[in-house]
Image (cartoon, helix red, strand yellow):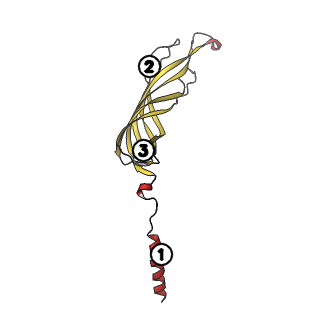
């Protein structure tokens, strides 16, 4: 008798356990991405390395384009090209310390990098958003390529890039 009651309870429990967990596919907040390659616009912040003398370009807003290609699973290859116009201090080292600052000028920079991105939602979006973390290598270049009074030249320095972002589609 006890065995029949236990079997009946287990059978009743299994009926409620067979209910669906989560969302119906048409109501899920996750959607498959439609493309494996994509062009997007980007906006962010150029974070300059701190310069003790203050003559290098400073931090500022940047904007550009980004191309991504899915490699496998949540891993993407990405290439970005962006630009910014930031301030830098011009000094004349031949003058006394209190008189060295000549002016502040605007410097146009071109930034580019290639790297890998890890999509935190895989090849899906969550309510249209896909957060990611990335890392790579790149360059930053002064568009004018000019020399300052004190001989400072920005050149084309190699950069290591890392960060996070959010795509929306």
Which mark sits nearer the N-terminus, 3 or 1? 1
Q: Which mark is residue 37?
A: none
Whole-number angstrom distance, CA of label 3 to CA of label 1: 41 Å
Whole-number angstrom distance, CA of label 2 to CA of label 3: 31 Å
Query: Is the residue marked by circle 3 packed among few (<14), some (14-19), or many (20+) residues within 10 Å?
Result: some
Image quarter for residue 130?
Answer: top left
Residue receiving disc 1: 13
Q: Nearer the viewer, residue 93 or 33?
A: 33
Q: Is 108 drawn above or below residue 46 in the view shown?
A: above
Residue receiving disc 2: 143
Label 2 residue SS: loop
Marks 3/1 in contact by CB < 8 Å: the verdict is: no
Residue 112: where, in percent of width, then height? 41, 29
Which mark sits nearer the N-terminus, 1 or 2? 1
Residue 41: where, in percent of width, then height? 43, 33
Query: Is the residue marked by circle 2 packed among few (<14), some (14-19), or many (20+) residues within 10 Å?
Result: some
Image quarter for residue 42?
Answer: top left
Label 3 residue SS: strand
The residue lying furthest to the top in this view is 94
Residue at image point 49% right, 87% down: 2
Residue at image point 41% right, 57% down: 25
Which mark sits nearer the N-terminus, 2 or 3? 3
Whole-number angstrom distance, CA of label 1 to CA of label 2: 71 Å
- The answer to whether one can see residue 106 in this image is yes
Q: Which mark is residue 118?
A: 3
């Amino acid at each position: 008798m006890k065995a029949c009651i236990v079997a009946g309870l287990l059978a009743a429990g299994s009926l409620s356990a067979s209910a669906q967990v989560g969302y119906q596919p048409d109501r899920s907040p996750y959607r498959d991405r439609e493309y494996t390659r994509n062009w997007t616009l980007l906006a962010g912040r150029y974070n300059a390395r701190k310069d003790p003398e203050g003559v290098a370009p400073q931090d500022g807003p940047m904007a550009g384009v980004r191309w991504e290609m899915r490699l496998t699973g949540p891993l993407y290859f990405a290439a970005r090209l962006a630009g910014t116009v930031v301030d830098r201090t011009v000094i004349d080292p031949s003058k006394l310390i209190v008189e060295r600052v000549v002016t502040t000028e605007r410097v146009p920079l071109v930034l580019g990098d290639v790297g890998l991105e890890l999509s935190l939602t895989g090849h899906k979006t969550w309510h249209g958003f896909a957060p990611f973390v990335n890392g790579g290598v790149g360059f930053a270049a002064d568009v004018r390529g000019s020399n300052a009074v004190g001989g400072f030249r920005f050149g084309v320095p190699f950069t290591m890039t890392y960060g996070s972002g959010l795509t929306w589609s």
